[in-house]
Amino acid sequence: PDQTVRNQAGTVLLTHREFQIIEYLAAHRGRFVPAAELAEKIWLRPRSSEYSSIVSTSMKNLRDKLQPLTNGKALIETFPRRGYVLHN
C-alpha cells in the first residue's frame, strides 16, 4: 500500500518502503544513519554492503519525490556510500 507525506507545499505519494525510510529517518532526525542500519531496519537484512545499492536507489527515489515539498532545500543529506541525515 502507498502512503502520503504532506506539508504546506503539497502532498507526495510514497511507496510503503519509502514511507518506512522517511519514518525511520524522522525518528532519528538530525542523527547520521548508516546505510547498513537502514538495510537492517527497513529491509530486515543483516548489515551488509550488498544492500548498499538498494538503499542508494531507494533514497534517490525518495529525495526525488520529496524535492517539490522542500523548496529546493536538501531535506535528506547524503554521505555517499556511508549514510544519511534527515534535517528539519
Image (cartoon, rainbow, N blue to C red):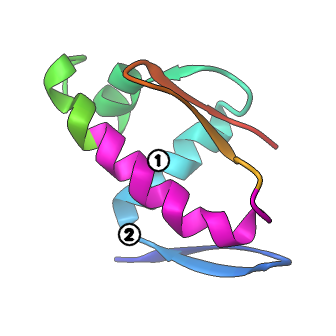
Q: Residue at x 51, y 63 (%)?
A: 64
Decide whether residue 79 is among the magenta residues. no
Residue 15 - label? 2
Q: CA distance from mark 1 to mark 2?
A: 10 Å
**Outermost residue, bottom direction?**
10
Q: Is residue 15 above or below residue 72?
A: below
Image location of residue 76, percent across then percent down: 63, 42
Query: The magenta stretch spans which residues?
Result: 55-72
**Which x, y percent locates residue 80?**
44, 25
**Residue found at the far left of this picture:** 50
Which of the marked residues, 1 or 2, is nearer the chain's N terminus?
2
Residue at the disc numbered 1: 21
Residue neighbourhood size for the residue with mark 1, other residues' Cα within 10 Å, grouped as few (<14), some (14–19), many (≥20): many
Residue 25 placement, left or right of 40: right
Residue 14, horizontal then vertical, whole percent: 46, 71
On-image quarter of the N terminus: bottom left
Farthest front residue?
Answer: 72
At 72% from the left edge and 69% from the top edge, which residue is drawn?
Answer: 69
Determine if the magenta segment contains residue 68: yes
